[in-house]
Amino acid sequence: MTTSKTGSFYLTETVTIPGTSAGGSRITGTIDLSAYVNVPTGQAIAIESVDFIYQTGADFGQEVRSMLAGNGCVSTQVVDQNPGGLFVRADNHSLVASGALQIDQTNNIASHSADMFPDNFGPASLSEAFLVVNDSLFITAGNDLSAVGANDLFVTARVRARVVKLSNKDWMSIAIQSSADQ
C-alpha cells in the first residue's frame, strides 16, 4: 500500500550551457532528494509532473533567435540515475521526463515538445506518478546541430512532487527496477 505523506511541492534545478558551446554539448545538474527519501521507513518521492523552461542572456529572456547560432534544438531529460553527462534512450526505466525546444533561428520560431511526462510506471495505487527511491534526480540539457548563441543558455526543470510511504513490497519492486538499468 502506498500513501501520500505530503501535498505537492516543487523542486527546481537549472543547468547553464555556456555561450558559444559547440553543437552536441551536454551539461548535467543534480536535484538532491536525500531529505525526502528514507530507506528504513520506506519513504520515496512521487513525481507528478515536470516542466522545462528555456532562457538566455543576463536578463534571462526567451528570445529564441539568440539561443542558438543557427537552426537546431535544445534537448532536455530528467532521470533518476546519473547518466554521466549523456542522454538516455527512451526505453530506459530511469527516464522521468524529456523534452525538446526546436529552434528555427532564421525565422525566430520555436516549438516545444514534451516527449514524456511521468507515466504509469509505479504501483497501481500511484499510477499517475513516477516513484523515485534514489537520493538524486539528474537534469541533462544540450544543444543539437547548432552552437549556442553568444550568451549562456539556461534550462530549468521544475518538478512537482510529493513524499510518499511505500510498502516493503512496492519499495523492493521499484529498487529492483531502478537497479536493472545500471
Image: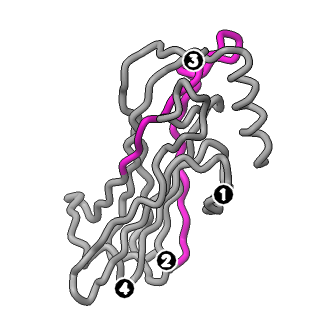
Q: Residue 54 versus residue 88: which sits nearer the camera? A: 88
Q: Which residue is mark 4?
A: 71
Q: Residue at image x 74%, y 29%?
A: 173
Which residue is depicted at the point 29% across and 84% down?
A: 105
Which of pointers 3 and 2 lies earlier in the amino acid sequence? 3
Residue under label 3? 2
- Name the residue carrying label 1: 91
**In x, y percent, where is residue 176?**
78, 34
Coordinates of residue 52 in the picture (x, y in percent): 37, 53
Quadrant in which the N terminus is drawn: top right
- Residue 50: percent from left, percent from top: 41, 45
Secondary element at image label 3: loop
- Write the start and end of the magenta stretch as one range: 24-51
Quarter of the image where one finds residue 44: top right
- Kindly identify the amino acid type of the residue bearing the numbered disc 2: Asp
Q: Name the residue carrying label 2.
A: 144
Residue 158, by quadrant, is: top left
